[in-house]
Image: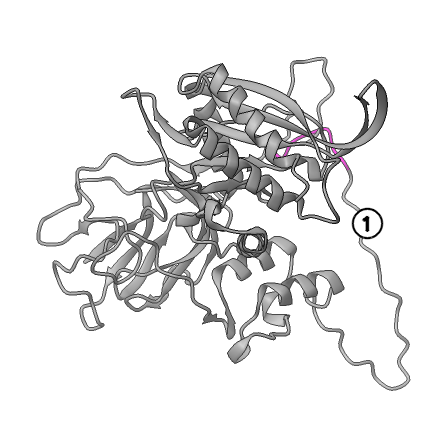
């Protein structure tokens, strides 16, 4: 009897995931709950375990291919002599109907394996079966992805996020020197190997030279010649004829794929309006934590004008104002934009804010942040000025109704008591959903924020 395993929802309704690495190949025997594949979503890199024990008949795609949630991930020939999950035990796995079993042929056609071209995503196939849930792993109750754990694959012990980073940086993880507990390869180990070039993927150790033998100088491979043709032999063109074009289109994956969807939805749903002004920091005493002061000022403004610390339901035209402040802080990475939530920001002092932000950034960088910490914030902050830019029109992501943007600090000439002085100032941009807030509320919110930032400490 064969059984199809459909890609489960790996986190809060995400529509697809990208294959990072298969732990098996067609023809292998795998046991129940052994790791089948490592998948990258918009929020994490997770190992997906096998729902059965048996022989692998089919795998849907190669590393880099995008698999749509609910479509075939793998097909197995179930081995009744090996441990199987008890019939009726709810694990939350998505799996298709049995093929050739007592109930007869499957009612859903198998989804063809994804093409090796990573630009092609597997499209969902029609099905008449219903899944019991969306939890990955042998769990009776719950709604979370099974927690990451370092597992040994090919003799190397590492969590999925570390394996994904090694693949991205071109590092052979089997050659990385492990510094973690019990010989676990850590994220820092991979980054160090990438920096010093000690474990390049595909590299081989040089053979020992025989005595008296002359060593030939290393040959540097010639760079690939550029071509005006695509891999299919046709002229590359991403713009209308007559316009010079370079490069080839690439499929968005993981975080950037989700970011594109979120931004499009926000643009379609929100009625954005932006107010800008400058916070005068001339009265600040000594060196202060700018981000901590921004968080404190936003909290003060939320208490003064709660209408912007709220969620708006456009379908039902309801607005929920929050008594607490969970601040979403935009974190820019090479993989795309993350917005982790700084929980209970209204209860943290400066040291607490700094410690929490440091923890969130570290979790984002090594992709270990729980999916629950990337949603549920009540208002957000984009501190883009740490790179460049003075004013902006940040995007409000529903159900939130406001986002604060902090621009690059500058020294400006200002008029003071009939004279002029040079003051340190911070540009502030406030974008709000005009369906949920009035212009007066937004202006009062901005004024309260500027007043708090103007305080000496």
**Looking at the picture, does residue 407 appear above or below residue 190?**
above
Q: Nearer the viewer, residue 184 or 58?
A: 184
Q: Secondary structure at mark 1?
A: loop
Q: Is residue 401 left or right of residue 124?
A: right
- Name the outermost residue toward the bottom: 211
Kindly identify the residue that appears in the image at 69 percent across and 48 percent down: 288
Magenta stretch, main secondary structure class: loop
Q: How many numbered marks appear?
A: 1
Kindly identify the residue that appears in the image at 28 percent across and 53 percent down: 135
Displayed quadrant of residue 205: bottom right
Kindly identify the residue that appears in the image at 8 percent across and 53 percent down: 102
Quarter of the image where the N terminus is located = bottom left
- Which contiguous range is marked in magenta? 226-231
Q: Which residue is mark 1?
A: 222
Q: Is residue 368 left or right of residue 247?
A: left
Q: Nearer the viewer, residue 102 or 199?
A: 199
Estimate how packed mark 1 is, as few (under 14), some (14 to 19) or many (20 or more) residues with alpha carbons within 10 Å: few
Question: Where's residue 401, x and y in %?
Answer: 44, 27
Membership of 351 in magenta stretch:
no
Q: Is residue 296 left or right of residue 102?
A: right
**Looking at the picture, does residue 29 appear above or below residue 412?**
below
Question: Where's residue 319, x and y in %?
Answer: 33, 25
Question: Where's residue 42, x and y in %?
Answer: 46, 44
Kindly identify the residue that appears in the image at 72 percent across and 16 percent down: 243
Membership of 227 in magenta stretch:
yes
**Looking at the picture, does residue 282 appear above or below residue 173?**
above
Decide if residue 448 is in sight here: yes
Q: Is residue 183 left or right of residue 278?
A: left
Decide if residue 333 is in sight here: no
- Name the outermost residue toward the front: 417
Displayed quadrant of residue 111: top left
Q: Nearer the viewer, residue 51 or 355?
A: 355
């Amino acid at each position: 009897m064969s059984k199809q395993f459909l890609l489960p929802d790996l986190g809060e309704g995400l529509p697809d995931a990208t294959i990072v690495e298969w732990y098996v190949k067609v023809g292998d025997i795998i046991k129940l709950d052994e790791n089948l594949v490592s998948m990258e979503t918009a929020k994490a890199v997770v190992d997906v375990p096998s729902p059965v024990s048996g022989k692998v008949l089919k795998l849907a795609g190669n590393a880099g291919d995008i698999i749509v949630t609910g479509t075939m991930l793998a097909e197995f020939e179930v081995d009744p002599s090996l441990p199987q999950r008890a019939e009726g035990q709810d694990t939350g796995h998505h799996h298709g109907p049995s093929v050739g079993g007592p109930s007869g042929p499957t009612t859903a056609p198998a989804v063809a394996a994804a093409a090796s071209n990573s630009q092609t995503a597997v499209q969902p196939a029609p099905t008449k079966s219903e899944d019991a849930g969306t939890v990955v792993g042998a769990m009776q109750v719950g709604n979370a992805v099974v927690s990451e754990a370092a597992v040994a694959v090919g003799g190397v012990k590492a969590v999925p996020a570390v394996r994904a980073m090694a693949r991205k940086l071109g590092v052979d993880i089997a050659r990385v020197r492990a510094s973690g507990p019990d010989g676990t390869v850590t994220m820092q180990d991979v980054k160090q190997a990438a920096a010093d070039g000690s474990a390049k993927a595909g590299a081989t150790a040089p053979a020992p030279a025989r005595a008296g033998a002359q060593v030939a100088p290393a040959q540097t491979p010639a760079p690939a010649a550029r071509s005006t043709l695509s891999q299919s032999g046709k002229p590359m063109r991403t713009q209308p004829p007559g316009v010079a074009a370079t490069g080839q289109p690439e499929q968005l994956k993981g975080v950037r794929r989700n970011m594109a969807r979120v931004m499009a939805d926000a643009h379609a749903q929100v009625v954005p309006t932006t107010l800008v002004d400058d916070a005068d920091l001339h009265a600040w005493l000594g060196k202060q934590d700018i981000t901590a002061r921004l968080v404190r000022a936003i909290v003060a403004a939320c208490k003064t004008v709660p209408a912007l610390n709220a969620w708006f339901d456009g379908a039902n035209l309801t607005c929920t104002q929050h008594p607490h402040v969970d601040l979403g802080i935009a974190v820019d990475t090479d993989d795309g934009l993350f917005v982790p939530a700084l929980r209970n920001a209204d209860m943290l002092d400066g040291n607490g804010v700094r410690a929490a932000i440091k923890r969130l950034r570290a979790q984002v960088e090594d992709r270990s942040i729980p999916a629950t910490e990337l949603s549920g914030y009540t208002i957000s902050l984009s501190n883009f000025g740490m790179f460049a830019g003075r004013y902006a029109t940040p995007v409000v992501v529903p159900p939130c109704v406001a986002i604060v943007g902090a621009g690059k600090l500058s020294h400006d000439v200002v008029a003071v008591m009939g004279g002029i002085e040079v003051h340190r100032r911070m540009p502030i941009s406030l974008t709000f959903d005009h369906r949920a807030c009035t212009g007066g509320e937004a202006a009062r919110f901005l004024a309260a924020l500027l007043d708090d930032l103007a305080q000496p400490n």
